[in-house]
Image (cartoon, rainbow, N blue to C red):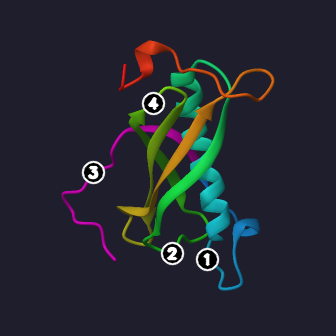
Amino acid sequence: MNTPPERQPRGEISLQTVAMPADTNWNGDIFGGWLLAQMDLAGAVMAQQRAQGRVATVAIDGMSFLQPVAVGTVIRCHTEIVHCGRTSLQIAIEVWGALQPQGRNVLLTEGRYTYVAIDEHGRKRQLPTETRTDA
């Protein structure tokens, strides 16, 4: 599946890294679980900033693996908050990378992650009012 040429990444870059040989599956492509972990880290960066403290991942919704990722691909995780509630945030995460040899920037993977703000004891806490969309 090719990303339409007019499509651009949404949100801000929260994480950028290189796919390495140790991250491959039995076919030689990057393992989907590795991509999920990178997306979770990127989403947590944004969630922690908005929550102004600790967060925990509570759900992953709507995952789509659109392109195989090769070793050496520089991936960029773009994040955008799509909903803030009383204690939780839903973040859309897109993984973009340049496919070789063309060097074309394409959407590789996308999904929605939900994080909940937690206190120092791991219990839910309210998000700061200025970050909520239901306030």
Please tell me the numbered disc located at residue 68: 2
Q: Which residues are magenta?
A: 1-17
Residue drawn at the location 69% of the way across and 73% of the way down: 24
Marks 1 and 2 close (CB-CB < 8 Å):
yes
Between disc 2 and disc 4, whose residue precedes?
Answer: 2
Label 3: which residue? 8
Callout in the foreground (4, 3): 4
Residue 127 sits above or below residue 43 on the image: above
**Amino acid on which the number 3 mark rests in the picture:** Gln
Left or right position of 26 against 88: right
Q: Is residue 5 magenta?
A: yes
Q: Secondary structure at mark 2?
A: loop
Q: Secondary structure at mark 1?
A: loop
How far apart, in angstroms, are the residues tagged by discs 1 and 2?
6 Å
Q: Quadrant of residue 114?
A: top right
Crowd tier of the residue under label 1, counting other residues whose Cα lies within 10 Å: few below 14, some 14–19, many 20 or above: some
Between disc 4 and disc 3, whose residue precedes?
Answer: 3
Q: Position of residue 117 (x, y in %)?
A: 62, 28
Q: Secondary structure at mark 3?
A: loop
**Amino acid on which the number 4 mark rests in the picture:** Gly
Marks 4 and 3 close (CB-CB < 8 Å):
no
Magenta: main secondary structure equals loop
Between disc 1 and disc 2, whose residue precedes?
Answer: 1
Residue drawn at the location 66% of the way across and 28% of the way down: 124
Q: Quadrant of residue 83?
A: top left
**Amino acid on which the number 2 mark rests in the picture:** Pro
Crowd tier of the residue under label 3, counting other residues whose Cα lies within 10 Å: few below 14, some 14–19, many 20 or above: few
Q: Position of residue 127 (x, y in %)?
A: 53, 21
- Asked if residue 65 can be seen in this view, the reply is yes
Marks 3 and 1 close (CB-CB < 8 Å):
no
